[in-house]
Image (spheres, coloured by chain):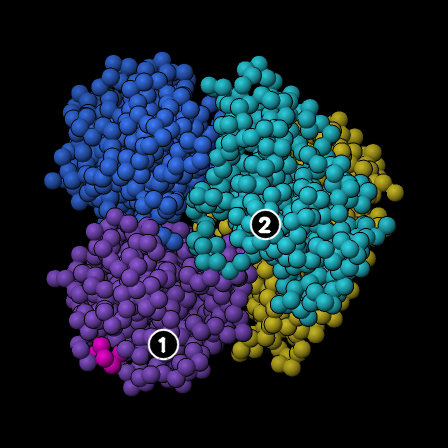
Chain colours: A blue, B cyan, C purple, D yellow
Amino acid sequence: MKLNVGLVGGTGYTGVELLRLLAPHPNVALRCITSRKDAGTPVVDFFPSLRGHPALDPLIFCTPDEARLTECDVVFFATPHGVAMSQAETLLAAGTKMIDLAADFRLHDPAEFERWYKMPHACPHLLKEAVYGLPEVNRNAIRQARIIGNPGCYPTAVQLGFLPLLEAGVINPDTLIADCKSGVSGAGRVAELSKIFPEVNDNFAAYGIAGHRHHPETEQGLRRIAGQPVQLTFTPHLVPMIRGILATLYATLTDEFADVQALFEQRYADEPFVDVLPAGRLPETRSVRASNMVRIAVARRPHGVVTVLVVEDNLVKGAAGQAVQNMNLMFGLSETTGLTALPVSP
Amino acid sequence: MKLNVGLVGGTGYTGVELLRLLAPHPNVALRCITSRKDAGTPVVDFFPSLRGHPALDPLIFCTPDEARLTECDVVFFATPHGVAMSQAETLLAAGTKMIDLAADFRLHDPAEFERWYKMPHACPHLLKEAVYGLPEVNRNAIRQARIIGNPGCYPTAVQLGFLPLLEAGVINPDTLIADCKSGVSGAGRVAELSKIFPEVNDNFAAYGIAGHRHHPETEQGLRRIAGQPVQLTFTPHLVPMIRGILATLYATLTDEFADVQALFEQRYADEPFVDVLPAGRLPETRSVRASNMVRIAVARRPHGVVTVLVVEDNLVKGAAGQAVQNMNLMFGLSETTGLTALPVSP
Amino acid sequence: MKLNVGLVGGTGYTGVELLRLLAPHPNVALRCITSRKDAGTPVVDFFPSLRGHPALDPLIFCTPDEARLTECDVVFFATPHGVAMSQAETLLAAGTKMIDLAADFRLHDPAEFERWYKMPHACPHLLKEAVYGLPEVNRNAIRQARIIGNPGCYPTAVQLGFLPLLEAGVINPDTLIADCKSGVSGAGRVAELSKIFPEVNDNFAAYGIAGHRHHPETEQGLRRIAGQPVQLTFTPHLVPMIRGILATLYATLTDEFADVQALFEQRYADEPFVDVLPAGRLPETRSVRASNMVRIAVARRPHGVVTVLVVEDNLVKGAAGQAVQNMNLMFGLSETTGLTALPVSP
Amino acid sequence: MKLNVGLVGGTGYTGVELLRLLAPHPNVALRCITSRKDAGTPVVDFFPSLRGHPALDPLIFCTPDEARLTECDVVFFATPHGVAMSQAETLLAAGTKMIDLAADFRLHDPAEFERWYKMPHACPHLLKEAVYGLPEVNRNAIRQARIIGNPGCYPTAVQLGFLPLLEAGVINPDTLIADCKSGVSGAGRVAELSKIFPEVNDNFAAYGIAGHRHHPETEQGLRRIAGQPVQLTFTPHLVPMIRGILATLYATLTDEFADVQALFEQRYADEPFVDVLPAGRLPETRSVRASNMVRIAVARRPHGVVTVLVVEDNLVKGAAGQAVQNMNLMFGLSETTGLTALPVSP
């Protein structure tokens, strides 16, 4: 089976990562890639790393009109926030499924979307139908979904880290801290002074502590998992590296006898992309570089604190890889198809 | 006035940083530098960056015997743990003061020293006399001291970050979290596989969460500041950068009306090397690169949490610079002498 | 068809890269991996990035005795120089083919081997039979070979860069300059002070200009290609990056009308792993990261000089990838099998 | 003596580096800093690294009108090309000297300026008077100068590297090659996509080989030194580091008995900022980080080739530091005043 696949946007880092993963995918036929601004330009002129691949060499950015997206089985949106929702009704009416890597379909409450993204939601009635694409939580719903809100990079790491503890009810949900560190590709392929090499290299800083858009998305997910309100303090930091997120999570244990190592191992025993490390080992971001794998360690600390350490590649499990995982589920393919390449290390 | 200064050890990063700071210091005459292993080698053969300086070009590593350290006014120890304490009695008897950049004189309790450093303390009776060299806490005691235990890099950042909150009694001392990130020079100039470039670059990880030697030192300092026991969860991480520490600190406010910004500004108003940023700004490690300055931001978070962000250069305020600051105090010099160079940025 | 494959050595960077490429190779069954020192240790304990792969999770380092290498169809040597040649006769006698990623079978002249590697050659009579594994030059010979001397990383880039010019006879072979720049993984996974992060990062330097082992190998290859003696000045440099080589080559044109762009395009038109960029574009190392592709640009400069720029991933086309390419040729597989993954960028 | 100093421009990397060097300079009173766009903004809001310095804390960007530059003894231009020449006549008429860190006064031929910088020269009659600010060549002229064209970063390294060989006439001036590598700060503090961290880090590439503005400047200088035409092939590369240039120079020796090591040592014996390394040692960029020092190694290669390796900090000796050195000379100060800080390493 070959799915007809369209890609809207594709000049950013999630776009090129989708191309890297979709081009060799055995069940994918890349039909079109749109960029209004760069219509007519071969994709490989933008991304010389893709030169020479038979599916990518002939690919040319086209306008949305030329793209005939409604003829696709599924369309990925690697666009700024607001694009996917504007095309949702047309695509769904044509029977085309959607996977949005931006935030249009992540938050269930349109008012919350509006507050954080400063625009009205174009199709609030579809928010109910949209499925939050975190397979470890929503696998069955994803299989039935027509619209996927693909999770943000930080929220993926933080939710997978707190999940076994919240489900088991062994931590106090009012004292959650997520001290997160991300490589610079998470900020996108945009020409900003604060992202040029001499500003970022040999440097480390926190940012966005007054409020980050991934906060409400993460709290929404944790709330659902916990089945009750949660209180999360979220501090993102920028690491002078290209890819990778490490989330260092802190919570207060309410059950002093909880075997947290066993909780994680059992919860993730059958997950193809979550690797619980043996007790005593700590994860490094490079151990998942360029792969869809998440690695997790959990450790009891003195004074009743539990620490969870989660690493992912923000462009793969935190974006394009999880999107392909969702596509696989939506179309009844093996969940790991096209996602089995080993991490690149060193 | 020129002090006769000796340096024991000096082939590591704190050693070369001391040389960088001491060579142009107007009140310092560098008398000797010891390295048993490298006796006879010119210092500039090790550190070409020092070539051409009139005080350093002629400097040659000598054996401890040749060094005649007892003729010095002050001796810095940039050595592994255990060296300074073995020479303390001889030096003090000769009237020579000591500044140890290792851990021999940081912990007041010899049993605790023994537990963490796996060696008996050579002169427990001197531990009482030794002064913990954190000028923002112990300035007057440092002025009178014969022995300084120069603080570790992480403990400096964490103590300065919690200090105003603990002194004012506005946080719960049982819920302190220090999520710390350090550049690789903090691990020393040692040939370890885990420190080579391909293992460290484009990578991020936590380490030492089962127990780090800076933990008891930090807790001891915080306990003193608070005047009561504290409970600290300390998680160090390795950043792919050369220099710099960022400590991200979390605590629970007990006084919901506390003006934390004002607390910090007032506490550090007269400190020459602590810069409290205006509300809303966040510190970056590069803003203190190669300088003795610490920069701090404090922010109220939702749910009664307060976050403090502290940056320092681990080799300067976290090691060699603070040692020079202590020397200045011990000998009645202006505290900032030799330490006024601006940070190097970018 | 599944080949029985053995790996001798495997705790270095070429070893883990071979595992990354061989594990998903459809015609490979990994039979054993040896490391005398680490016998008994699971491979994934060394390289957590490999955790979770069905072919690697059960793999355990074994001693050479346990390995039963003579039952393998082919054995890769990712070992220090000198190991492969000591086992060659035994393996060949058993009908096992060999691919040596070290230098034992690269130089044809045993005296030259001895001069550069400071050891006598163990089987000089096999040097004649061994084939230098650069498929773009020796494809047919590789198909018939029992022993492959897999090229060094620098020599691969330099030979592929000068090849079309020397074959066409349009440059003076007495004036060749190769100014080469390599990422740090090229120096191996060894604990050396000069390779630790604070020594390498934010730094750039040349090394080895008094004589580098890749010099005689490169000259030998260029001499063969040119069919006459060549004079090469070779200057390697260390770049603060993990992977990648850029070779900047200079030569004097002897034919002022030579269409150098066409020469390169024609010569490499059918090569699956050599990509000649369009005139005016320059290659970046990241455009081949983690892939077996080489990208080349050629440019006429003023004053009759021609410059060639070649990029490769030193661990793939410069080591493990080229070794797999050679294996594919030796066993009649499609040359690109297992090597088609796209580069990882950013 | 305190000079009244003005700075035009100052939001770029050469600007902040000038502030770092000028603020503690004992003979400098910083009178004003202009930025039309940022008038009214405190300088430390742009550059938090400068916070806390008594000369910089009160400094506020002002408009050119407010600046009253004609009351200054000397004005530095850290501006885009074209600004300094537009103000030259006014300043000179008022008796104010000028040091331009851009290219307005580097090329002696207005036609060449126009060809490379795509604008007519505003005051071609002043080009004759302007002195090229390379003290190792033009020290006496600099002492008398009213206008300094401060050399570019690459030209400084390349000229100092070829200088002793060309002056001694021991190389063929028709075969010069300069293979140069620069840190990213050399490209300025500008928001360009090609300079953001994920595009630059773990990457290496050449650029600008079709023609770089530093080429005519360098050839002009070499021609003057040689007293005859020269032919230079110049290839710049971008290194994933913040600061530093390494120039690897190649030339053909015409005198096979020339003692090149002695030539360099003699030529630079009295130069305060040129350090000729002992034979056999190679320079690293970090050995000059944040300092005005240049370090040089020269080596004979096989086949009559000589290689020179030159390192400098592109923001110091390659820009701001050399500008201060020129100021010192112009006003009869000791040449090294304010420039003696040791390099920062690691």
Q: Is residue A12 above or below residue B63?
A: above
Residue type, numbered disc 2 = Arg
Quadrant hosting residue B318: top right
Residue C19 image point, x, y percent = 28, 58
Residue C89 within the segment the image draws in magenta: yes
Q: Residue at x 59, y 60 (%)?
A: D284
Pointer 2: what residue? D243
Q: Residue at x 62, y 67 (%)?
A: B37
Q: CB under 8 Å between callouts 2 and 1?
A: no
Q: Does residue C169 appear in this view? A: no
Q: Is residue C90 above or below residue D28?
A: below
Residue type, numbered disc 1 = Gly
Which labelled disc corresponds to residue C82?
1
Q: Is residue D284 left or right of residue D19?
A: left
Q: Residue at x 28, y 68 (%)?
A: C63
**Over which residues does the magenta segment extend?**
C88-92
Residue B88 image point, x, y percent = 70, 54
Residue A119 within the segment the image draws in magenta: no
Q: Is residue A163 above or below residue C207?
A: above
Q: Disc 1 on helix, strand or loop?
A: loop
Judging depth in this view, the residue of D126 and D147 nearest the camera is D147
